[in-house]
Image: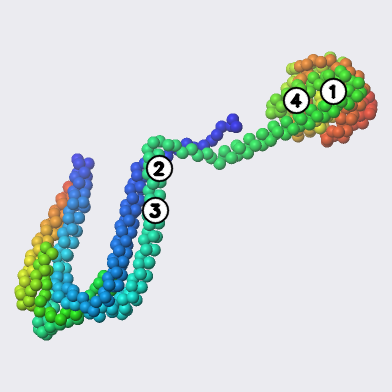
Amino acid sequence: MDRLREEKIQKFEEFVDRRLKPDLVRAIAERDKVFEQQKVFSDLRKNLENLEKNSITSLRSMVNLGSEVYAQAEVPDTRHIFVDVGLGFHVELTWSEALKIIPAREERLARQIEEYTRLIAQIKAQIKMVSQGIRELLQLPEE
Amino acid sequence: MGEPVKGTVTSLSSIFAPEDAQKASVHVQEVISERQKEVQQLQAFLNDNTSLVNLVKKLPDQLHHDIMVPFGKAAFFPGKLIHTNEFMVLLGEGYYAERTSKQTVEILKRRGQGLESQIESLNAVIKDLKFEASFFDETATEAAEGIVEIREDFVEEAFDEDKATTSGDDDFARILSRIDELEKEELESELAEEGEEKEEADEADIEPEFRNLEIKELLDIPVSKDSHIKVPTPSGSNTPVMPVDHNILKEGLSHAPMSRDEVEVSTLVSSSSNVSSKTRVAASSSSNASSKTSVPASGPSNASSKTSVAASMSKEVSNFGSRSSNDKAFTGSIVEHTHNIENSQKGQTSAPAPTPASKPVSRFKLQRK
């Protein structure tokens, strides 16, 4: 009986280590990505709001040509902005339009994050369950 | 080379378990793949660098370039590239350098060279790792096949040394035998001059057998315990009490030829420069009695010589053996034999001082007393 128990315990541990924990790691990584994107959009929104607030029509910036070699660039007219709407598309929008869709985009990202968070929680719960089972199995022999 | 060879035979699989070798090989393969990824990454950097150099070269061709200026990561502004000859290059740690197109190109080229050297070193590392992996693979296959590693202990060398010494002894014996032969030939010539044909014949007969036995007996001769050599009575009727070293040939020795053997042997022995009573006997060979007397006199000296020179003793024994087996009667005049022996004795290097060969008779008298 003890041998069986030990085998079971080993199986459970292996399950936890090989399946659940990597799943957890992957889920967390995906969520972080979405977090980043969300941050990007929120930054964009903030900048746009700033632009609008200060009525900045033109601006100069440094463009990274690659390998951190910058060249000067000038934006003569900031009214039109191309926003990434996914699937490799960028839509030309005015500020106000951009400011409308950007929050929508942000919201969508937030929902994605929530989903990932739920998944992560699920995996964590599974791990806890299995470890509890192992503990029970270990405790029983002691009794 | 017939000595048993001590060594260990270990199967490769015991030293390098095939599974371990395979695991090691797999591990090395992984490391190799990692390095290769790094090399690929560096190669990608190098490619980017090259394309950037081209771009930087082309930009100054125009005053302005229409571009999409990124605004963050998810938005673009349509705009223009201005000051097309001015570039800001990151030097590291937050330091930038404003450079023209040409200067930027130079900077980028230098960076490319650094990348290339890195790639080369990584390639060398990969090469070494590949050698290691191939070694592990070979070991794994060999171990699986059951190839056995044979190791011989250091003791082996001692054996080799012993062999060398024994072979050296053999060589020494052979050299001595050759010297004996030469001396015999000289003796024979002297005897011939003296007109002792019979002696020559006897000696000639003895010599080949002597040589054969000499080499045979060389390793078999035990160190004589008895240093004393008893001389058989002149009549030869009494069983001669041979010295221990001669005990080997006791059986084969007959009374009559004993003395003769002694005499003969002594002559031959003297020629071989062995310290032996027999040589003494040969010196006094003219008469059995004289020979006998000489034998006991040289007995003690013989004993010492026996212990010291096994080869010489073996020769003596062999001589006796040959003589006894031959059962040749010695009828040559002893007096003349003595002269010859005297001459040979002078040539001897034996330790005991050669008794005055010129007076074998007197010696004999002394001995008898």
Using the numbered discs, state the Cα–Cα distance from disc 2 to disc 3 in whole angstroms: 18 Å
Amino acid beneath label 4:
Arg
Q: Residues within 10 Å of mark 2 (few under 14, many from 20)?
A: many
Mark in front: 4 vs 3: 3
Eye-nearest disc, 1 or 4: 4
Residue on which the image places disc 3: B127
Q: State the image quarter where residue A87 is shown.
A: bottom left
Q: Which residue is mark 2?
A: B139
Mark 4 and mark 3 lie on one chain; the one further toward the N terminus is 3
Q: Chain of mark 1?
A: B
**Mark 3–mark 1 distance (CA, rounded to whole Å):** 82 Å
- The mark that comes first in sequence, 1 or 2, is 2
Query: Which chain is home to disc 2?
Result: B
Amino acid identity at mark 1 = Val
Kindly indicate whether the residue at mark 4 contacts the one at mark 1 (C-beta within 8 angstroms). Answer: no
* Badge number at residue B263: 1
Q: Nearer the viewer, mark 3 or mark 1?
A: 3
Q: B161 left or right of A137?
A: right
Q: Nearer the viewer, mark 2 or mark 4?
A: 2
Residue B152 percent location from the top left of the image = 52, 39
Color theme of the render: rainbow
Residue under disc 2 on the same chain as residue under disc 3 = yes
